[in-house]
Amino acid sequence: MTSPFLQELSRDMRLRGYALRTEKTYILWIRRYIYFIDRRHPADAGATEVRGFLTYLAADRKVAINTQKVALNALVYLYHKFLQRELGELGFTLASKQRHLPTVLSVNEVRRILDQLSGRNKLIIQMLYGSGLRINECLRLRVQDVDFDRMSVTIRDGKGRKDRQTLLAASTVNLLEPQIEHALVIQARDNLQGVGASMPTALARKYPSAFRTAGWAHIFPANNLSTHPIDGTLCRHHLHDSVVRKFLAIAVRQAQLDCKKISTHTFRHSFATHLLQGGADIRTVQELLGHNDLNTTQIYTHVLGRHYVGTSSPLDRLG
């Protein structure tokens, strides 16, 4: 059972508009921190304990750099925003992150993976690669987010709580249209039971019948009904990302590409790299990916090698 203190933290994060995934992650790290300080109330601890916890994670647990940063962000929220206490100078420097080039597939490798898939599963990977979507951006798509006239996809409340538009590949239409029809059939069946697609809580209160409208239906609905994680109502959520990871792993193995580290995010990397390779402007790619900083997008120019900068190895010029 969650303690009253952690429940209060959850309510505060929801009031501030934090994403549910961020809320769960912060609660996890704050709980670990409380155990680290022998279950004392965080208000009775401070910079010394926070520094000790971060040092413990880095030196004893040897966690990854990104994990250190998430733990620090959770504790900064706890003290600065919730308890409204300044931690001051912690005297702790996070390890610098080494730049890693992302895994990028060739066009032929993408084709080989898609050839192992069909129906809904193939469509999901096509959307990841054809529109440059993150996995949860793809699975959260609703019928109203797809514009066949403008051949565009609207991503709502994406990373950084931003909306953006990206391309809709013409190749997806022949699978996307029947998938939308299938989703609407499921929604109509659910509506007969008085339930429907999961909705943002504030919007559900403002428009209590919105879950019955076609536009709010999830394009990739889950197989079963479930309770809403915030208000507890019975609804149909979108497909869970673990389903995609399982069938993708099988497709990668069947395509004999399991020597590469391929995840759902690999197709987003490949989307950006192939656009640049085809001559697309880097700022256009930045907009399509939803990056705030152009430096984030520029990582793909390093993946391209000679295809981007027009150079070749001196070995090839020996004749």
Image: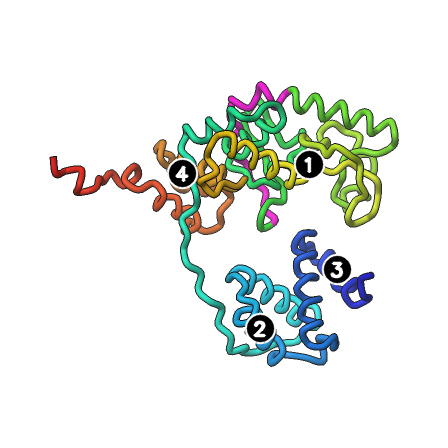
Q: CA distance from mark 3 to mark 2?
A: 26 Å
Label 2 residue SS: helix
- Give the crowd class for mark 1: few <14, some 14-19, many >=20 residues within 10 Å: some
> Which stretch is magenta?
161-177
Label 1 residue SS: loop
Q: Amino acid at mark 1?
A: Leu
Q: Is residue 4 above or below residue 176?
A: below
Q: Residue at x 77, y 59 (%)?
A: 11
Q: CA distance from mark 1 to mark 3?
A: 25 Å
Could you say which is closer to the camera, residue 17 or residue 270?
Answer: 270
Q: Residue 200 location in percent, x, y? A: 74, 44
State the residue position of label 3. Answer: 10
Label 3 residue SS: helix
Q: Which mark is residue 56?
A: 2
Q: Amino acid at mark 3?
A: Ser
Q: Between tags 3 and 2, which lies in front?
A: 2
Q: Residue at x 51, y 22 (%)?
A: 171
| 19 sits to left or right of 7 | left
Q: Please tell me which of labels 4 and 1 falls first in the chain.
A: 1
State the residue position of label 4. Answer: 273
Q: CA distance from mark 4 to mark 1?
A: 28 Å
Q: Please tell me which of labels 3 and 4 falls first in the chain.
A: 3
